[in-house]
Amino acid sequence: MGGVIVTSRGPLFDGRAGQAIAAAVDKSVDTVARDAVDEVRAILSADLQNATGYYESQIQTERQSDSQVVSDAGVVYGPWLEGVSSRNASTGFAGYGQFRRAADRVRQQATETAEQVVRQHLSGVR
């Protein structure tokens, strides 16, 4: 009776594909988060008058588990600038909504951005 021998080789079987996918996901998350930081800063640059640059310099990403969070590093007047502070009503200032607006814009491009990053990472896996 004859036998069949199956040999499994290549990136799918030796772990390279899994590593490349994990790296692509991490890079995608980082890239989208950086895009969000850039977008928040662009909105602030267009909207703020007489800015010192301090607030913009505090916009950052922070890794939390398998995701990235974009924040203003807890700047005390950040909620007021965003328009979500209780002081907005008393001052009559509606806020700039920079994080909300940036999230809306980045969300529209996130899939395309991630697909480009994944293609770049997986193109070398053969």
Image (tube, rainbow, N blue to C red):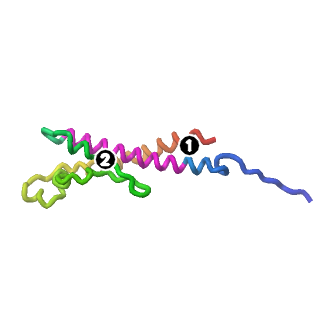
Going by the numbered disc 2, the residue's amino acid type is Gln
Q: Is residue 60 left or right of residue 22?
A: left
Q: Considering the image in quadrants, where does the C terminus appear?
A: top right
Please name the residue shown 18% across and 49% down the image: 96
Please name the residue shown 83% across and 55% down the image: 4
Label placed on residue 25: none
Q: Considering the image in quadrants, where does the N terminus appear?
A: bottom right
Q: Nearer the viewer, residue 109 or 124?
A: 124
| Mark-to-mark CA distance, 1 and 2 | 28 Å
Label placed on residue 122: 1
Please name the residue shown 73% across and 51% down the image: 8
Q: Is residue 28 magenta?
A: yes
Q: Main secondary structure of the magenta part?
A: helix
Q: Is residue 21 left or right of residue 2?
A: left
User: Which residue is farthest right?
Assistant: 1
Is 99 drawn above or below residue 121 in the view shown? below
Is 89 drawn above or below residue 48 in the view shown? below
- Mark closest to the chain's N terminus, 1 or 2: 2
Number of other residues with Cα within 10 Å of mark 2, as a class: few under 14, some 14 to 19, many 20 or more = some
Q: Which residue is mark 2?
A: 60
Q: Is residue 79 magenta?
A: no
Element on which disc 1 rests: helix
Q: Looking at the picture, how far across and down is residue 101, in whole percent?
A: 26, 49
Mark 1 or 2: the one toward you: 2
Q: Looking at the picture, how far across and down is residue 13, in whole percent?
A: 67, 51
Magenta highlight range: 21-46
